[in-house]
Image (tube, rainbow, N blue to C red):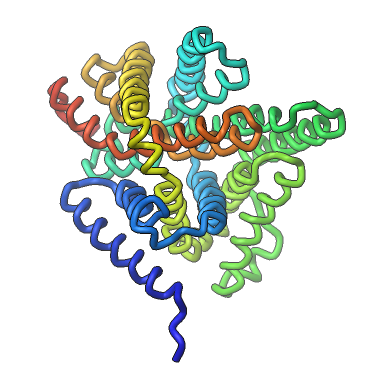
Amino acid sequence: MHLDPFMPQMVSIIFIVLALGFVLKLLHQPHVVAYLIVGIVIGPWGMGLVSDTDSISRLGAAGVVFLLFFVGMETDAKKLVENWKLAIFGTLLQIALSVGFVWMLGLYFQWGIERVILIGFVISLSSTAIVIKLLQDSNTLDSKVGQGALGILLAQDLAIIPMLIIIGLYKTDAVESAHMGKQVFGSIVAAIFLAFIIVKKVVHIPLAKWLKHDHELQLFAGLGICFGLSMLTAWFELSTALGAFLGGMLIGAAKETQWVHHNLNPLKVLFVALFFISVGMMLDVDFLMANWIQVISLVLAALITNTFINAGILKISNFSWKESLYAGALLSQIGEFSFVLAAVGNQANIINQYGYQLAICVIALSLLISPLWIALSKKLIKYEETKS
């Protein structure tokens, strides 16, 4: 029988993921790090097992949609309400300080306001996947620091919505009234839809009872909601990720549709892995080696800046200095959703291809270095983890 040429590539990818996954598990590192390294190894600038950049982009786009769909599904409005002052005002202050820091740099480099806003948004987001994984592994998710970090992460996940809308408004050089009106109307519809889900708390989806015992139709119904709403927001010329998030919120509010978690969770694992692997494959190793001083400098600047900005905000919220600094280190990396913002900024011509590749390198390395940075910070401040 004829062997499909993609089969050896797929098998190689699976076993490389398994091998690196086991190694990093022994080193107590999150799987996200393994996915990024696998992407670098198998990508066009690594072993070259996969060189189709168009397929890489499609896989990354599908992964982003699934990632935001599950974030929306798992976002609990009650947790945000309990720590609403820290979560909302702390996150807004953190974003404002990040944009302000970039604005000062922008004065020197003569950046436009749209670039200042984009880069400020990019560095203000932390990695939900890495932080929650580290808190779960140390059994401190329910601690004071864990709950404080979780509240900020949830607020940041919600903040991605207005960020995507704001950046999306710069997609055209000349603002047309019809184009602008479509985006504004779509934004209003999305805001009303989100407010309805939060206020309603429990939403009943039509035909949900018919799907209750049919696992195959459940799978396609979940996919239909996820990608259907993504396509709808794309029609309004907004981000597909925004539609996926709203779809996840809808599923989460419909209590009788908990089957979505069970049926789509394997797909979530697969597509989230594909997203991070695709990011690693996009990392131009030659670009990194040629600009390593600039990349490393920006990564360290981001880690240090984010650590102290978040620590200062948490200190205002009645955390001790040790707790604040440790939580600040936890939130110091640049998050996975920043890839989305950078991609949208590149599509909107806010940053050129050089700036986009630089952003990918900085974000990816901050994710790779983050666990080591957190462990080092913990030792320096001699923080002892305790459960609440």
Q: In this view, does 325 lie above or below 345?
A: above
The residue furthest right is 178
| 260 with respect to 113 (left or right) | left
| 365 with respect to 123 (left or right) | left
Q: In this view, does 218 lie above or below 290?
A: below
341 or 173: nearer the viewer: 173
Query: How many numbered discs sit on the rendered protein?
Result: 0
Is residue 79 in view from this perspective? no
Residue drawn at 33 percent across, 54 percent down: 41
Q: Position of residue 239 (x, y in %)?
A: 65, 41
Residue drawn at 70 percent across, 32 percent down: 171
| Quadrant in which the C terminus is drawn | top left
Residue drawn at 14 percent across, 22 percent down: 380
Residue drawn at 31 percent across, 46 percent down: 33
Rendering quarter of residue 303: top left
Q: Where is residue 116 in the image (x, y as percent from the top left)?
A: 55, 18
Q: Where is residue 62 in the image (x, y as percent from the top left)?
A: 55, 54
